[in-house]
Image (spheres, coloured by chain):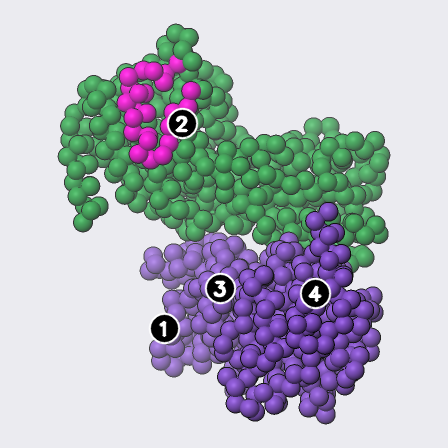
Chain colours: A purple, B green
Amino acid sequence: MRLITLLAASAALLSVAPAKAADLSATAAALRDKALIDSTAWSVAESLTTEIGARPTGSPAMERARDWAAAKFAELGFTNIKVESYEAPSWLRGAESAEVVAPFPQKLHILGLGLSAPTPKGGLEAEIALFRTLEELKAQPPGALKGKIAVVTEKMIRAQDGSGYGAINAARTAGAAEASRRGAVAYLVRSLSTDDTRLPHTGGMRPWGDVTPIPAAALSTPDAELLEHMAERGRPVRVRLSMASSFTPKAPAWNISGEIRGSEAPDEVIVVGGHLDSWDPGTGAVDDAAGIAITTAAAKLIGELPHHPRRTIRVVMFGAEEQGGAGAAYAAAHKDELGRIVMVGESDEGAGAVWKVSLPKGSAGHPAMRAFASTLPAVKAYVEDAPARFGGADVFPMVAAGAPVADLHQDASRYFDLHHSADDTLDKIDPAELAQNVAVWAALLYTVADSDIDFRALAAGGGQ
Amino acid sequence: MRLITLLAASAALLSVAPAKAADLSATAAALRDKALIDSTAWSVAESLTTEIGARPTGSPAMERARDWAAAKFAELGFTNIKVESYEAPSWLRGAESAEVVAPFPQKLHILGLGLSAPTPKGGLEAEIALFRTLEELKAQPPGALKGKIAVVTEKMIRAQDGSGYGAINAARTAGAAEASRRGAVAYLVRSLSTDDTRLPHTGGMRPWGDVTPIPAAALSTPDAELLEHMAERGRPVRVRLSMASSFTPKAPAWNISGEIRGSEAPDEVIVVGGHLDSWDPGTGAVDDAAGIAITTAAAKLIGELPHHPRRTIRVVMFGAEEQGGAGAAYAAAHKDELGRIVMVGESDEGAGAVWKVSLPKGSAGHPAMRAFASTLPAVKAYVEDAPARFGGADVFPMVAAGAPVADLHQDASRYFDLHHSADDTLDKIDPAELAQNVAVWAALLYTVADSDIDFRALAAGGGQ
C-alpha cells in the first residue's frame, strides 16, 4: 500500500509542467522517488546477463549483445535507435592451465591477461622468480630474469573510492613488459582483487610496443599466496604454463544508442551510457550491465513523463570498453555534433550506491544544479566542491575534446571483489543500490535536460 | 614483552606435578594459555596445504601425504608412529565442462560429485527439467524425466551449528539417484554452499545400489540462479555436459598415527585426530588440515610437559574420510584394543573457534571434567548438558562399538562457504581461531590423560 501511495504522489507531481528551479526540483525529486521503486534497471541487468552473459569485443556473444541492445531500446520506448560500426582490438582466450610441477605438485588457478602471448603448443615450464612488489621486479638488472617465470604478488587495498586499483594497476598493465625486458619467459601477477576467492581476475595490459610479448596471467589471490609459501622454503619452484589465445587488432564493434528526444531543443544532446562489452569469465553484471541498466532506466523513466524535457537524452551502449576503442570511435563519429553535446557521463563503477556527484566545472552554484543537489540528501549523496574531470573511459575522448562532464561516484568497496572475474554475476547486484543509482541519474538528467543551463559558458565564467 | 611474560608464567605452572583436580585445572589452564600463543597448528596446516595440497584418496598426492604425516609426527616428537594400510573407494575427477547451448549460450561452472558416472565420450546434450527443491523432483512420476537433465536449485541456509548442511544434504547425496529412477540422463544440483562465489562445491553421493548411475555435478550458486532465470522464460533450456572420471572401489589407503606415550598407564589410550584426505578442488585447508593441525598441536604441547600425563594420547591422521572407509578400517584394526580406549574425538568442522563441548555421557559432574570446564570461559566456550554422541565420521565406528566420545563443536558459520570447493585454502584459516581450538583440545586431552576418570563406569552409573 505504501508503495502505491508513493507512486500515486509521484505521478501527480510528474504532471506539473516544470518551468522554474522549484519545478525542476519537484519533478527531479518525484523522478528520484519513482526510480527507487522501479524495477526497470534490474530487469535490464537480468536480461543482459541471462540472455547474453559474457560478451568480449569480437566474440559471437557481442554480436548477440548488439542485437539485444537495439531491441531493448525499442522495447523501452527509445527512438532514433542507431547501431554505429567501427573496429576495435579483440583478444580472445583459449584453453589455459597452470601447475606447480616441483617441488610440490599443485594446480594453480590462472586467467590470461588481455594481449597475453600464447605459450608454445604443449606449454612451457620454468623456475619462478617471485617478487612481493612490481618495484622489486623493476630493480632487477637486464637479463636477470632470463628463462624465468616472473611472479609479482603485490596486494590490492580495499577502498570506498576504488583507489586501491589505481595504486597497483601497473602490476597488471605493465608488469609483463617489465619482466620481458629482463628476459622472463612468462609473467604471473596476483589478481587485482580485494577478495579471497580462488577465482582470478583478468584485465588488459598496455600494448607491448617494442617489447617481446610473453604469456601473462593473473593468479587467484590464494594461488599467489601459495607460491609465496612455496618460495619461502628456498628451493626452486618450477611452474608449467599452457595458454592459448587469439588476437584481432581490428575486430568489428558497435556503439548502440537510443534517445528520449527533447521537446524544445532536440539537437541539444546529453550523452550518457555504460559499456556493453565485458570480460569473458563472468556474465558482465557489475561490469557493466549495471551501468547499461542504470542509464537506460533513468532515461526511460524520463521518457515516460507527460512531456519530454527540452533537450534530448541519448543513452549509448558502448561496445568496446575493456579492450579499448569505443570511446575514441564515438568521439570521432560525433565530432561535428560535439558543440551541441550539453553534457556527457558514464556509469561504469559497478552497482554500488552513488555517494558523491561531481558536476561540470563552474556549475554547482547555478539554480538548476542547486535544484538537483537538493534531491540528493534523501538518497545519501551530495555534490562535491571539485568539478568532474573524467566521466568514464568511453566518454573521456569527448571530454578531452571539450564536452562538459559529470561524474557520479559509486561506493566501490566491493567492486574489486568481483571486477573482471567469474564472480561478476547478477546475484552480486543489490536491487536497492541499483535503484538508488537510477534515482540520482534520473534527477540529474532531467534537471539538465529541462533547463537551459550552459556548462561551457559557466566554465568559461571561471567558477570552481 | 607481554607474550614472553605469559609464556614464562605458563612454563612455571607446567612444572608443577599435577595430582588433584586443582592441579589438573592449573596445568590445563597453563596449557590453554600456551596454546593460544603457539604457532604449531598454523605451521602444520601451512605445511600440509603448501607441500601437498589437494589429496583425494587414491591419488598420488595422498601417497605423498602419507609420507608427510609420518615425517611430521617424527619432527614433532611423537613416538610409536604407525602407518596402517587398508583399502577404500576412490573416485577421481577427469576433465569436466558444461554449457547452455540454447536458447542463451553460456558456460556453466560445475564440479562432478563423487561416484558420478562419466558422460559418453563427446558429452551429452539434453533439455533441463528444473526443480526448486528435491521434494518437487521426488513428486515426479516414473519416467517423467526421461531424456532430461534434472536440476535441483534448493538453497542452503547459513547457521552457526552447520545445521543448514544436514537439512539439504539429500539434494546432493540422493538427488541423482532419484533423478535416474525417473529417467533422467544427468543431474545438476545447486552447490551445498552458503557463499555466492562462482566456485562449485563437490561432495560424495550415496552408493547407487540398483539404480543406473548417471553423470551428476554441482553447479556454483550463481550458475544455479542463472538456470533459474533462463527457465523462468518458459523456453526449453538445453545443456551440454562433458564429464570424465575414474572409480576404484578398493584403492590403497592409510591411517597414520603417532603417540605421546603415557607415563603411568601407557596402554590406556585416548584416540583423537582429523582426516588427512581431502576433496580435490581446494588445498584441503579447513577440511581438514585444520583438524590434523589442531589435534597434533594439542598433543605435541602436552608432550613437551616436564612429565607426560598418565595415559597415552594417540593422534590419528585418517586417510579416507571424504569417500569413506578410514573409520571402519581403524575400528576393525583396533577392535582388540577397544576396551582400553579411554575416549575418542575428532576435529573435522573447519577452523572456526570451539564454542561448545559435549563430554562423554555421565561425566560432566566428575571433578576432572569440572576442572576442564573451568578452563573454558576464558576462551568463550562451555560444556553443554547433553552428552556427546558422534565425535566425527572417522571415530564414530569406535563410538558405535562402545568407545566414550567427546564432541568439540566449532563455529561453522563460514565453514560451508569453503567446504569441498577450490576456496578451501590456507588463507581462510584464522590463526587465532585455530589456536583457540588447540587450547580447548589441549586442556581436555591433558585432563583426561592425567586423571583416572573412567567414562564407561560413569555412563553405566546413569548420569546425564
Q: Are marks 2 and 3 in contact (CB under 8 Å)?
A: no
Nearest the viewer among A145 and B131 is B131
Residue B357: assigned label:
2
- Which residue is identified by label 3? A160
Q: Label 4 crowding class (10 Å Cα cut-off): few <14, some 14-19, many 20+?
A: many
Instruction: Say which residue appears at 65% left-offset and 56% top-offset.
Output: A431
Give the chain letter at badge 2: B
Give residue A68's position: percent from left, percent from top. 79, 67
Q: Label 2 crowding class (10 Å Cα cut-off): few <14, some 14-19, many 20+?
A: many
Nearest the viewer among B172 and A164 is A164
Q: Is residue A126 above or below residue A432?
A: below
Residues in magenta? B362-385
Q: Label 3 crowding class (10 Å Cα cut-off): few <14, some 14-19, many 20+?
A: some
B374 magenta-colored:
yes
Looking at the rendered structure, the kind of residue marked 3 is Gln
Residue A208: assigned label:
none
Tag 2 secondary structure: strand
Give residue A438's position: percent from left, percent from top. 66, 65
Judge from the rendering whether residue B133 lies leftward or rightward of residue B55; answer left or right: right
Q: Nearer the viewer, mark 1 or mark 4?
A: 4
Judge from the rendering whether residue B428 lies leftward or rightward of residue B323; answer left or right: left
Instruction: Say which residue appears at 49% left-offset and 67% top-offset.
Output: A161
Are tags 1 and 4 found on a single chain? yes
Looking at the rendered structure, the kind of residue marked 4 is Leu
Q: Nearer the viewer, mark 2 or mark 1?
A: 2
Tag 1 secondary structure: helix
